[in-house]
Image (cartoon, coloured by chain):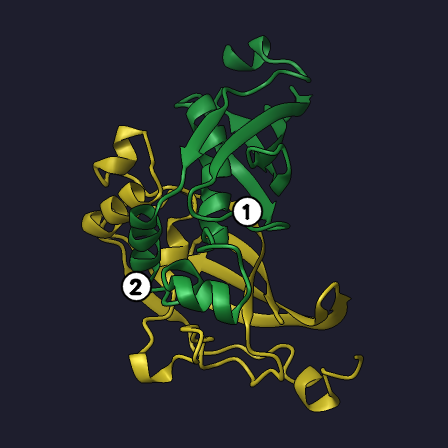
Amino acid sequence: MGRLNHIAEGELLPEIRHTTDTVGQFLYNAALWNAHRIHFDYPYATEVEGYPGLVVAGPLMGDWLAQCVEEWLGEDGRMVQFEYSNRRAAFVGDVLLCTGKISAVDKASRTATITLELLNESGEVLTPGRAVVQFTE
Amino acid sequence: MPGLINEELLSQIGLSPEPRIELVTRRDIRKYSVATNQRQQKYLDGDEAPPLFHMALFWDVMEQNRTSPDGVALDNWLPKFPLKRAMAGSLKLEYYQTVLPDQTLSAHRTLSDMYEKQGSSGPLIFYVVTTEVRDKAGEPVLTEIATRILR
């Protein structure tokens, strides 16, 4: 229970900053086999769908939140629950910040709950999330 | 604009196609890990799959002539919804075991709910797909509840 004894409610996870570009969007959507034009076809995204730019893939933003948890956790346990909701869009060129905060610790079950937020440079929450991690004994 | 979801559509709740079966390869894990900017070496080397890798594993490999004008191809087992433009939604996951290369996994999907709401720029349809991913022995790997949005 070593690591669990050293964490507390309110503790902040190390932040991770992600820059977004067209190559990253291409690779991600290719890995999924996702041809949604809003991610790579600028005239379509702006003129047909009315977005201000190419849209960053929503599940990618979810993945970045999961990474925030996983990098903090390391090999001391595993993520047992994870959720996120894409509330606002991000656009290629945005710099996004993943933040996390421990919102609950349960020593009996060796778990911690983490509240997550993916923010844009204006401080708007684009993707809130939540994770539960279980520490190894 | 209520009434987009009629009784016929509602009757499709519970629909469940044949399970999808896919082999996890180290190369696919590596590609996903690079594409998502993973920094942990176990992911970049493909020794273990990141927590959301299953999305890439089970994303439908759709033929180009089956995509709609926006490039999206809804899974062909889903009913035809009256709204077509896809938006990102939300995901809830429970994990039971780590995904490793060379595993054969199956995805058991069910259309578990659908409803409509009025958004700021028009009506929206929400549909929920529950996916249970199991290993070759039938043991649970993860459960995913995905809420997807159409506008």
How crowded pointer 2 is (Cα within 10 Å; few <14, some 14-19, many 20+) is rated as: some
- Which residue sits furthest bottom? B8
How crowded pointer 1 is (Cα within 10 Å; few <14, some 14-19, many 20+) is rated as: some
Looking at the rendered structure, the secondary structure element under dot 1 is strand
Apparent side of residue B139 relative to residue A89 in the rendered image (left or right): left
> Which residue is denoted by mark 2 in the rendering?
B22
Tell me which chain the residue with mark 1 is part of: B
Could you say where residue B100 lies in the image, as x and y percent from the top left?
29, 45
Write down the quadrant of residue A40 in the picture.
Answer: bottom left
Image position of A134 with respect to B149: above or below = above
Is residue B106 visible in the rendered image? The answer is: no
Q: How many marks?
A: 2
Distance in Å between CA atoms under marks 1 and 2: 20 Å
The mark found on residue B94 in the picture is: 1
Is residue B129 visible in the rendered image? The answer is: yes
Write down which chain is painted yellow: B
Instruction: Please give the name of the residue rendered at 57% of the width and 9% of the height, measured from the top-left corner.
Output: A6
Could you say where residue A31 lies in the image, as x and y percent from the top left?
30, 56
User: Chain A, which colour?
Assistant: green
Identify the amino acid type marked 1.
Glu
Apparent side of residue B106 relative to residue B43 in the rendered image (left or right): right
Tell me which chain the residue with mark 2 is part of: B
Instruction: Please give the name of the residue rendered at 65% of the width and 78% of the height, measured from the top-left corner.
Output: B13
Looking at the rendered structure, the secondary structure element under dot 2 is strand
Apparent side of residue B28 relative to residue B133 in the rendered image (left or right): left
